[in-house]
Amino acid sequence: MRVLIADKFEQSGIEGLKAAGCEVLYQPDLKDDALTHAIRETNADVLVVRGTNVTGAMLETGSLALIVRAGAGYNTIDVAAASKRGIYVSNCPGKNAIAVAELAFALMLALDRRVPDNVADLRAGKWNKKEYSKARGVYGRTLGLLGYGNIGQEMARRAHAFGMPIVVWSRRFERAKEHPTQAHALEAAAPIGDVPMSLAATPQEVAARCDVLSVHVALTPETRSLVNASVLDNLKSGSYFINTARGEVVDYAALEKAVRERNIRVALDVFAIEPKDAVGEFKDPIVAVSGVYGTHHIGASTDQAQEAIAAETVRIVASYKDTGKVPNVVNLARKTPATHMLVVRHRDRPGVLAHVFDCLRSGDINVQETENVIFEGAQAAVARINLDGAPSDGLLNTIQAGNNDILDLHLVTI
């Protein structure tokens, strides 16, 4: 199996892929036309990327079967185009969660103690202990989390250790708004180990109840500009806001207004428009606003995180190579158009399923999914075939009578 790596990748991951029997092509500077050309010319089976954009046009040129995003988010990959071509898209969720949570907490403490301003004044030869001794402290202050995936959960663990109450909004808990009894059950189940927290029905409610608001949601059409004026206006004056998720989840005009008019302190690791390259010019007016700190989209960039992501990438590719199964797939249908299941009990002999599929094709019925389970001794099997329509009684009789190795069949409405 040929693996093309088009971004910087850990040497341990490269060696792991080779040990798994893969031919590895490491070209970490590929992008745009050069990446399109490489996909076509290398005839790679697997593409591994980190932040590089993968477009639909690129996927039309080669024979890729799997794209691995060596990280959590996959918004830089045209997932819809990959799905149309039957290309798996997989990611490495949770492997950088600790790293991102560590940075988010560093930014929180930097906001509270104004660490960057301390450093800037010291480097300028200024000593101002009187000014920088003014800090609120985070103990007892409420941390609000928008999103409760792997990173949100790591944030909760750390906040609890700091003595911070926690309030959470997550799409996974949204159903609780409509079911009070379920809300109670979810809240009881929400703690991780000994980490207590309370749930909020909306992002606006989280903002109103917290002193520090930290964002940990994936970028989707539903979360784009999730943190808008309606959320930010609910923050108390002097609150802290931290974003280590994606720049596009925040309305930056509303954020700047909150900073200027309501003394909200802000720390950002991500921005709506970032340079394509690791080094380059950066111009975003938000970082020039007093009260805003920024880092260079480095949340996941620790040695520990990158080693863990490399190991997970190797696991994904090796699983696909050895078993045909892909862990962490993000683009398989959660629900197919199937309406009926045809259950066929048959002798385990050649041609049985070919006969069934041929009959279904003659009835213009499409197979959505199929599973063939073998009984002990490999003499008999049961095939479960999900269909996008119901075969007629006549077609079922044709299937049954057309092959003596079919022992029984019946149709189930899904």
Image (cartoon, grey):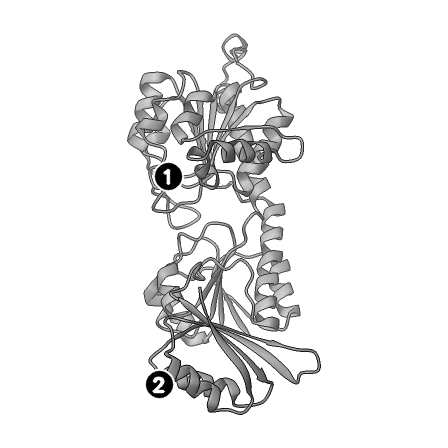
Residue 337 or 39: which is nearer the viewer? 337
**Do labels 2 and 1 touch, CB within 8 Å?**
no
Say which element carries label 1.
helix
Asked whether the viewer can see residue 406, the reply is: yes
**Residue where numbered disc 2 is placed:** 362
**Residue where numbered disc 1 is placed:** 249
- Please, is residue 257 above or below residue 327 in the view? above
Q: Which residue is at a point 49% across and 25% down the rendered structure image?
A: 116
- Please, is residue 245 above or below residue 82 in the view? above
Q: Position of residue 339 (x, y in %)?
A: 40, 66
C-alpha distance separating marks 2 and 1:
49 Å
Say which element carries label 2.
helix
Q: Which residue is at a point 46% across and 29% down the rendered structure image?
A: 200
Which image quadrant: the N terminus?
bottom right
- Closer mark to the observer between disc 2 and disc 1: 2
- Please, is residue 324 above or below residue 275 in the view? below
Q: Is residue 90 left or right of residue 13?
A: left
Q: Which residue is at a point 42% across and 46% down the rendered structure image?
A: 279
- Amino acid under label 1? Val
Q: Position of residue 48 (x, y in %)?
A: 50, 62
Q: Which residue is at a point 51% across and 40% down the rendered structure image?
A: 299
Residue 206 or 241: which is nearer the viewer? 206
Quarter residue 340 falls in: bottom left
- Amino acid under label 2? Ser
Circle 2 crowding by C-alpha within 10 Å: few under 14, some 14–19, many from 20:
few
Question: Which callout, 2 or 1, points at the residue further toward the start of the chain?
Answer: 1
Which image quadrant: the C terminus?
bottom left
